[in-house]
Image: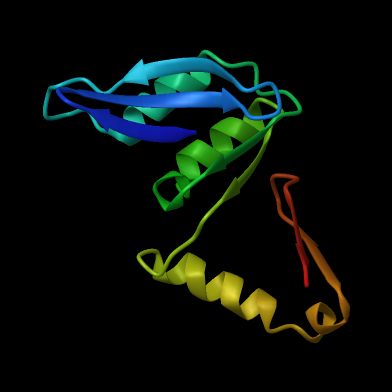
Amino acid sequence: MHGEELPGVRLVAGYAVKAGLALAQEGVRRDEQDCELNAAMRLLEQIQLQGLVLTGDARYAQRRVCEFVLDRGGHYLVVVKQNQPQLYEDIARLLEQPALRGGICQGGTKRGATAIVRN
């Protein structure tokens, strides 16, 4: 997903990178209650997520986005920055595990998601 601001218009688009196609786009409404994250959620409702990998910047590292993708059979890869300190610290702690020094560390969650980190 990618957010773009054009003069007077803010859009969020979903791309099929290998095909070079925009799957869908959603505008950010001009009212005070809307934001790019809400537009992204509306966009995701339009896309069949089964087996797809959603990639996004740090603004999409939100529980509701990730759970939405997982609930529909998709996967996600998002950037995590220090503006989410607990999540950032949890990931940093995972990366400090000795298992990572040799190559791969894998861990599951209650929701069935798996984190695989490769050096």
Specify whether 23 is left or right of 98. left
What's the image's color scheme? rainbow
Seen from the viewer's position, the closer of residues 81 and 2 is: 2
Q: Is residue 61 above or below residue 15?
A: below
| Residue ID at (48%, 46%) | 63
Q: How many marks?
A: 0
Give the quarter of the image for residue 15. Answer: top right
| Residue ID at (58%, 16%) | 47
| Residue ID at (69%, 21%) | 19
Q: Position of residue 43 (x, y in %)?
A: 45, 20
**Quarter the C terminus occupies:** bottom right
Q: Is residue 100 above or below residue 87?
A: below
Seen from the viewer's position, the closer of residues 14 and 83 is: 14
Specify whether 88 is left or right of 26. right
Give the quarter of the image for residue 105. Answer: bottom right
Q: Position of residue 111 (x, y in %)?
A: 69, 45
Give the quarter of the image for residue 34. Answer: top left
Q: Position of residue 56 (x, y in %)?
A: 51, 43
Q: Is residue 43 above or below residue 79?
A: above
Q: Position of residue 69 (x, y in %)?
A: 60, 32
